[in-house]
Image: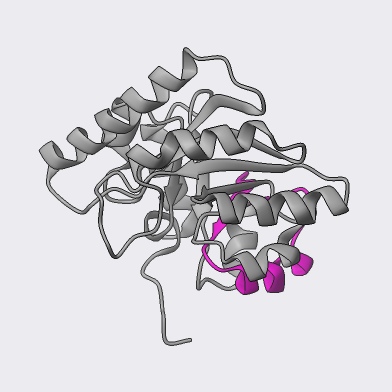
Amino acid sequence: MSIEENLNNIEENLNRKKVVLVAVSKTKPVKDIQSAYDVGIRDFGENKVQELINKEPELPKDIRWHLIGHLQRNKVKYIVGKVYLIHSLDSVRLLNELEKHYSAEKLTANTLIQINIGREESKTGIYEENLEGLLEACESCTSVVVKGLMAVIPKGNEESCRFYFKKMKSIFDNLKKREFKNISMDVLSMGMTHDYKIAVEEGANLVRIGEGIFGKRNYNK
């Protein structure tokens, strides 16, 4: 199926007034991103800083770029002013690097805190018990704001997916009840191609879909 047909199918399953669709374009060429843009998509997600900054100049300026992959501290300087939302804030050290570079440019970094909800060693993200320390550090920033939470859950069956999505929603809801400086719980980013319908049922208001839009990725390119 074409990119447009894939998007039409996804649109039928999403209430776009309530759920933001981020088209994950990692490894995909500029022409595929342009095809999705031409049928109305404006939010695109990249995993790697280099890939994002290579593609960004070749595409329309009103695209909202989401950095959804692990952000290394030495790459922060390259994304200042280019990224709409960083989904992968996961340490005080990264927070400090964002604060340094964004304050130097008098800009604001919009971020989501990534929680490693399944405690998987192969994945990045902060463990739940370390969340309070990061939140406290965020409150003292002047150039970084937290807009919500993000998770990449462990692969599993529907029951397993629901378990982790419910857990994330519970953390999100509990934080939403509290008063913070620089922190709001507006965005709950969870759900990908194979589980986004379950994620939305469990409270996600942003989903990240790649293969479901663009087809299988070619990592050999």
> Residue 126: x, y in percent?
40, 48
> Residue 199 location, x and y as percent?
31, 35
Residue 139, image x, y percentages: 64, 31
Q: Residue at x 52, y 71 (%)?
A: 28
User: Does the magenta portion include 156?
Assistant: no
Question: Which span of residues is magenta-colored?
Answer: 39-65
Residue 185 located left or right of residue 217 = right
Q: Quadrant of the N terminus?
A: bottom left
Residue at 20% from the left image edge and 34% from the top image edge = 162
Residue 59 vs 28, above or below: the answer is: above
**Vertical placement of 136 versus 178: above or below?**
below
Asked whether residue 7 is in view, the answer is: yes
On screen, residue 115 versus residue 117, left or right, reads right
Nearer the observer, 124 or 27 = 124
Q: Residue furthest bottom?
A: 220
Quarter of image, res 175: top left
x and y percent of residue 26 in the render? Answer: 51, 67
